[in-house]
Each structure stands twice: as C-alpha cells, then as structure tokens.
Amino acid sequence: MKALFIGGTGTISTEISRLAVSLGWELFLLNRGNKSERLQSVQGVSFINADISNEDNVKSRLSGLTFDVVVNFINYIPEQVERDIRLFSGRTRQYIFISSASAYQKPLSDYRITESTPLANPYWQYSRDKIECEKVLMDEYRKNGFPATIVRPSHTYYDYSIPVGLHGEKGSWQVARRMLDGKSVIVQGDGTSLWTMTRSEDFARGFAGLMGNIHAIGEAVQITSDESLTWNQIYECIGGALGVKPKLCHISTDFLTACEPSLEGGLTGDKANTVVFDNSKLKRLVPGFNASIRFDQGVRKTVDYILSHESLQIEDLDFDKRCDAVISAHEEGIRVYRTRKRG
C-alpha cells in the first residue's frame, strides 16, 4: 500500500507517519523540509521536497505516481482543497482531509458530540474555513465521486508541547514555567467544564484504521479519546507531572476575551465549551480501536520529554506579563466591588 502525506511532521502527523511505516506502508512525505529531521531516521520514508502551494511544480514532481491514500495535514481554506482535487483526481483511491472538532456547533445543543452534530461556529474563522473545506469535498464526492474522507480531531497532543487551555504565540512552556515558579495560571471559567485530550499515539491508531478503508469513503469521522476531564483536573495533572501543586486563577471567558479579543476563537469558539465525544462511528469502522492512554499518563510523557530537551523550553515573557496584567485586573475588580459593597 502506498501513501502520500502532505506535511507529515506535525503534532498529529508525525506519529501517524511512524505507524504507517511500521505497518508496511510505502510512505512519501511532501513538504518543504520543515521539521523533517523528526522522521529522517525512519526507514521506508521517501521525501519529496516541494511547496504544495506551487501547484505546477507539485504536479511535475508527482508525475507518474499514484497512491492508495493521500492525506493533506496542512489544508485550512477551500481554495487549498480545490487545488488538491485538481492534483489528485484520478491519482488516489482515497483522499483524507484533516478538519477540526472546533467546527461543531457553538454553543452546543447537546454536550454529546457525534458526526451528526451540526457544523456552525460563529466565533472562529479557522473553524468556519474548515466547514467550507468539508462542503467543497462532499460536493465533489457527490458530483464526481472524488474519494474523500473527513477526519475531525479535537485537542491532540504529543511530546513537543504541553496541552493547556491558554498560551501565548511561542507555545505553552511559559504556562509550565509559571507553575514551577509558583505563579498563578489562568483557567477559563470555573474550571469545571469538560474537555477531551487525545495522545497522538492513540489518534494515530484510529487514523491508520481509516487509511485504505473503503467504508470510510464519503464519511466524516471524529477521532478522540473517550476520557473527559475538567480543566481543573487537566491542570492538576500537568502540575503533578511537573512536581508542583498549581495555583489556578479562574477568570470568566467573557472577561478574558474582553481583555484579549484574539482569544475569542480559541475560547468562546472552542475550549470554553464542555465537549464529550461519542466515538461509536470510529469503532464501527475500525474494530478493536480504543484510546488507551490516560491523560495523566500521557502528559507525564510530554512533560518529561520537554524537561529533557531545553530547546523546547521557549520563554514567552510577553505572554507572562499579559497573564500578570489580566490576573491583576481581575483581582482589582473584585477588590473594588467589595469596597463599594462595604461602603
């Protein structure tokens, strides 16, 4: 079996790439060389150095090649999907698009999410673009038989980044640093809403079961763990892995987005909502699949890896200052209210 991965070295795709090779797939990775060192030592991977946005060049580089599966891990807007339809029509038996569980209805009409949950997110352009990408693919499947499969991940994590609810542009290490320094970390809301974290090894096993699976053609499938945790539990697990008791500062999502409007998509449009995923469809398509890595176990692996790789401990002093400012404003608001109430 032959697969082409476009990207292939990210949080989700690195472990899928390793697993595909271990299962005997002949794997081609098409990317610009970014982070390819993660897979350079893996036997059985052929690298195609190209920029997928250069359609003519990619078409030339792939001349004469056909695939059982093509997966694009880095498509975000409909125009990119339309390009891939042109490139891979007649060249693959299955095309897998990576969508997002953030595309599901916000706010939810039911906290239990299935693939039939409506797609509608007025708070995040990223999610609305993914929805449009799905529409393009399903239209092409219905009209011309393009062999599309849509996969919707939720919060998937691996060794390179600690999964948190709120972090800066340089990643999540600064949140861990605040915990280690005894500083408060911000948790949206009261920390009791439910969230689902999925370790990439578990995700990869579910994903691999969809590759080359004729029953997955024309279908949308979500891949997540069945474990649901509160955000308070999530931060307690992270703190435990770091060897500290985290100080949590609970701040309403409305206050956070008023202070930092750029947070609206990732919070109001995603992490501030309780989500519990029903993976029955995945388990029908991939018999025997079950996510087996508990979050406390998985995040300990992540923390241990980051603590042993200094290059991943990237400071974000601007984010640190903004956290202090928001926490200070929140505490001042409480102080002013209590003073006025006493007066």
Image (cartoon, rainbow, N blue to C red):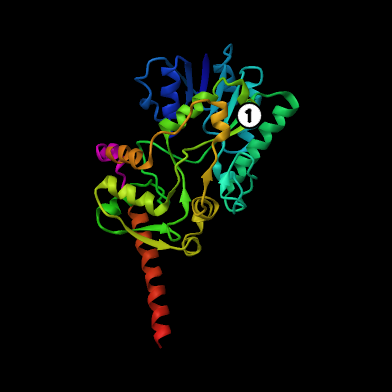
Query: Residue at the location (58% across, 11% down)?
Result: 64
Specify whether residue 151 is in view: no
Position of residue 259 in the picture relative to residue 149 (left or right): left
Query: Residue at the location (40% across, 62% down)?
Result: 250
The image shows residue 273, relative to residue 310, as above or below, that is below
Residue 251 colored in magenta in the image: no
Where is residue 184 shown, x and y percent of the image? 32, 60
Query: Residue at the location (33% across, 51% down)?
Result: 236
Where is residue 48 shown, x and y percent of the image? 48, 19
> How many residues crowd mark 1 within 10 Å: few (<14), some (14–19), many (20+)?
some
Where is residue 291 shown, x and y percent of the image? 44, 34
152 vs 83, nearest the viewer? 152
Q: Which residues are magenta?
A: 305-315
Q: Amino acid at mark 1?
A: Arg
**Residue identifier under label 1:** 83
Position of residue 9 in the picture relative to residue 239 (left or right): right
In the displayed orientation, state which residue is furthest to the bottom.
Answer: 343
143 vs 292, nearest the viewer? 292
The image shows residue 233, relative to residue 92, as above or below, that is below
The image shows residue 87, relative to residue 236, as above or below, that is above
15 vs 54, nearest the viewer? 15
Q: Secondary structure at mark 1?
A: helix
